[in-house]
Amino acid sequence: MDDRTPLGRSSLEVPRLGVGAMTWGEARGMARLHPAQIAYGGAHGHAEEKRALEASLEAGVDLFDTAAMYAGGASERRLGDLSTGREGVLIATKFPSGFRFRAEDLPEELEASLARLRRPHIDIYQHHYPGRVSIPDLMSQLADAVEAGTVRAVGVSNYSADQMRQAQAALAERGIPLASNQVEYSLLHREPETNGVLDACRELGVTLIAYTPLAGGLLTGKYSTENRPGGFFRRVLPRYRRKGLEAIDSVVGLLTEIGDRYSKTPSQVALRWLIENPVVLPIPGAKNGNQATANAGALAFSLTTAEIDALSEITLSWRN
């Protein structure tokens, strides 16, 4: 299995793969209308989420990503429940819990997440969306939390290259690195390569945490024009309709061909393509133990340069 690596230039050591826990927990009330719940379906329940956590830890995948906003806090509560008393579990979460947020609200947000997670500190605390908040003011608040010991590493999410540089500069004044930027990245969503984010990560020594690394299931090989996915959003989005599914036939075919050489699935090859980039850490979702075990299989082999280049070439239209 791949060695562990520092998260950016922070002192936090992480695996080369994490687990997305966006749909974990029991959403109640309006939280059941969260886009993730509608798009991907609800959780598989406490027992299966426990199996997902245990299977991940057994494979050395000990980083779990959530957010205060997911399922109205239910995802954080479930992770807190499942991880309490277990050694070595790393938790990344994001704030705020709602759409109205000021930099001075951070201490309250942090306290609430710590309570839901039942932890004295958060390993990676990430600002979910840049919005209109003052980045320097917010980074100052986060630096306070690092110095207080309630946050180990500072991350951001959905930040542009320029916003990353603002955050990094503000944190550097306090001697703290910007550790990560979590953005969507996959073979079918290669925008970080063209919008400057991936280059900024390399320049600043920041880890790119890749969410939706399997393109909402399109890279798993499970879906086709004869077997379309469930979930309201996935049924209506163009890329899940006939023309969209036909467009990725050649991509899935190449993933399958490469996977057959290593006795791996298309999903594992798609994740491996990301892992081969030392700057990138993918966090595929896992609703149950089988999915967690399958995802971790991406750590057990390597792609050749020719295979990496072939996958990059066949998905050029999703880059440009």
Image: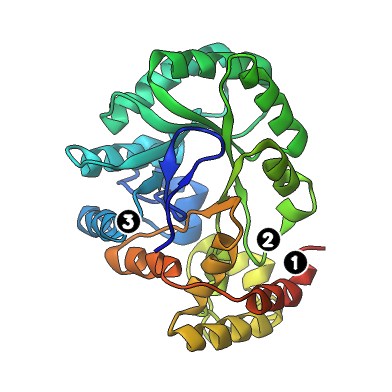
Residue 33: x, y in percent?
46, 47
Identify the secondary structure beneath mark 1. Answer: helix
Q: Is the residue marked by circle 2 packed among few (<14), some (14-19), or many (20+) residues within 10 Å?
A: some
Assess whether mark 1 and mark 2 are in contact (beta carbons under 8 angstroms).
yes
Could you tell me the amino acid type at mark 1? Trp
Report the residue marked by disc 3: 60
Report the residue marked by disc 2: 189
Q: Residue at x 67, y 66 (%)?
A: 188
Judge whether residue 30 can be spotted in this image.
Answer: no
Instruction: Give the numbered dot on residue 318.
Output: 1
Q: Is residue 185 above or below residue 28?
A: below
Could you tell me the amino acid type at mark 2? His
Could you tell me the amino acid type at mark 3? Gly
Assess whether mark 2 and mark 3 are in contact (beta carbons under 8 angstroms).
no
Q: Is residue 199 above or below residue 170?
A: below
Front disc: 3 or 2: 3
State which quadrant residue 167 falls in. top right
Q: Nearer the viewer, residue 170 or 203?
A: 203
